[in-house]
Image: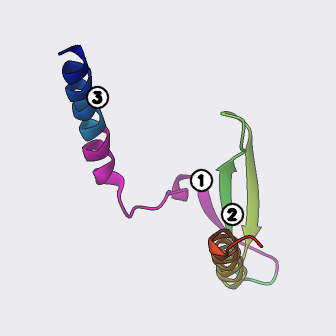
Amino acid sequence: MLKVIVGAVAALGLTACVSGDSQYAGKRADFSGGTTVKTNDAGEEVICRKKTQTGSRLRKTERCATQAEWDAFDEEVQRRMKDMTNARQQPQG
């Protein structure tokens, strides 16, 4: 009887965790709160993004680039993520 009760409580807890995460399904992290736009000496818009450094709650890093440079950076990150995902899916020989 105790096993049945423990199993039911565990199932309810697991269901609560899964249903709570559904509100975040398909959403990406938003770092736009730390984004600023400036103009460089050449008159181009430069977008600066602030990001909290991994392992710290207070330390932030800032990276500034033009929109074209950000697009290239984002594409590179996407490509690397695909490469890592594909490498994990290939059988180790």
Q: Residue at x 82, y 78 (%)?
A: 41
Q: Residue at x 68, y 76 (%)?
A: 70
Look at discs 1 and 3 and give the one toward the viewer.
3
Relative image position of residue 38 (x, y in whole percent) = 68, 68
On the rendered structure, is 43 left or right of 29? right
Relative image position of residue 29 (x, y in whole percent) = 50, 57
Corner quadrant of residue 92: bottom right
Q: Name the residue that disc number 1 marks.
A: 34
On the rendered structure, is 10 left or right of 45? left
Residue 18 is inside the magenta segment: yes
Q: Secondary structure at mark 2?
A: strand
Q: What amino acid type is highlighted by mark number 2?
A: Cys
Relative image position of residue 64 (x, y in whole percent) = 75, 66
Pick out the residue farthest to the front: 1
Q: Name the residue that disc number 3 marks.
A: 10
> Which range of residues does the magenta coloring cover?
17-41
Q: Secondary structure at mark 3?
A: helix
Corner quadrant of residue 55: top right
Q: What amino acid type is highlighted by mark number 1?
A: Gly
Q: Name the residue that disc number 2 marks.
A: 48
Q: Secondary structure at mark 1?
A: helix
- Sooner in the amino-acid sequence: mark 2 or mark 1: 1
Give the vertical position of 82 relative to 27 (above or below). below
